Image (tube, rainbow, N blue to C red):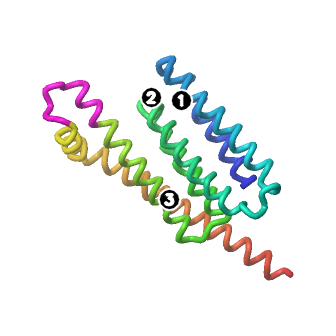
């Protein structure tokens, strides 16, 4: 889990700072993003610091951390993706973290969930924008149908979703290989 904190947490912070600095979202979005980021950082720090105190529950704590990070990624993606398109990269953090200590099928489940949440948020955001632009549109269903009809946007989201899954499975395979090498040297 410490690997995730050393590499993905700084990446997520940089991604969010760039999104806020270069795209200048509304003040409320900026404050909410920093609030989510700060509280998540504090909670992850506390959980990692106290993991060994709760040794019996370590597996459960790690699983909760993965799902919490996925929820935070979804919230930050929802808030900032309209301003900064690389925000989808946040969806790599939870599955990559799960690859360090979960079984491959569990990593696949986390990666698939992250991908589906990202696509759902893309569709919802697109539909909400259409409804705001055209109040005479016949509801959310019609807006979602229109957004789903934009094949270029849908293909882009699908490519990102597939990358999240493949990257996560790659990370899981690497973690598994490292453990096999370590165990073979005993």
**Quadrant in which the C terminus appears:** bottom right
Q: Is residue 130 above or below residue 25?
A: below
Task: Sort mark 3 into few (<14), some (14-19) or many (20+) by Cα contacts within 10 Å.
Answer: many
Q: Which of the labelled discs sits on residue 83, or is there none?
A: 2
Q: Is residue 179 above or below residue 94?
A: below
The answer to whether 130 appears left or right of 13 in the picture is: left
Comparing labels 1 and 3, the label whose residue is closer to the camera: 3
Q: Earlier in the sequence, mark 1 or mark 3?
A: 1
Which residue shows up at 36% across the image and 47% down it?
120
Residue 180 image point, x, y percent: 73, 78
Q: Position of residue 176 (x, y in %)?
A: 67, 72
Q: Residue 112, located in which quarter of the rendered image? A: bottom left
| Separation (CA) of disc 2 from disc 1 | 7 Å
Q: What is the magenta range? A: 127-139
- Residue contact between numbered discs 2 and 1, judged by CB atoms under 8 Å: yes
Ranked by sequence position, the earlier of labels 2 and 1 is 1
Sooner in the amino-acid sequence: mark 2 or mark 3: 2
Q: Residue at x 69, y 74 (%)?
A: 177
Label 3 belongs to which residue?
Answer: 111
Query: Which residue is painted at 60% across and 28% down in the image?
Result: 35
According to the image, label 1 marks what residue? 19
């Amino acid at each position: 889990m410490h690997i995730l904190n050393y590499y993905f947490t700084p990446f997520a912070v940089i991604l969010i700072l760039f999104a806020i600095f270069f795209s200048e979202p509304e003040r409320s979005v900026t404050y909410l993003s920093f609030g989510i980021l700060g509280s998540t950082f504090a909670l992850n720090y506390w959980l990692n610091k106290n993991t060994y105190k709760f040794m019996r529950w370590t597996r459960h704590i790690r699983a909760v951390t993965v799902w919490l990070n996925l929820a935070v990624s979804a919230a930050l993606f929802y808030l900032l993706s309209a301003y900064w398109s690389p925000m989808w990269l946040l969806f790599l953090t939870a599955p990559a973290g799960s690859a360090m200590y979960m079984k491959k099928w569990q990593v696949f489940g986390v990666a698939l969930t992250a991908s589906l949440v990202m696509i759902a948020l893309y569709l919802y955001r697109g539909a909400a924008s259409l409804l705001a632009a055209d109040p005479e549109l016949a509801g959310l269903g019609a807006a979602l149908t229109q957004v789903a009809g934009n094949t270029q946007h849908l293909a882009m989201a699908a490519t990102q979703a597939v990358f999240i899954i493949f990257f996560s499975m790659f990370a899981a395979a690497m973690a598994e290989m490292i453990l096999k090498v370590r165990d073979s040297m005993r």
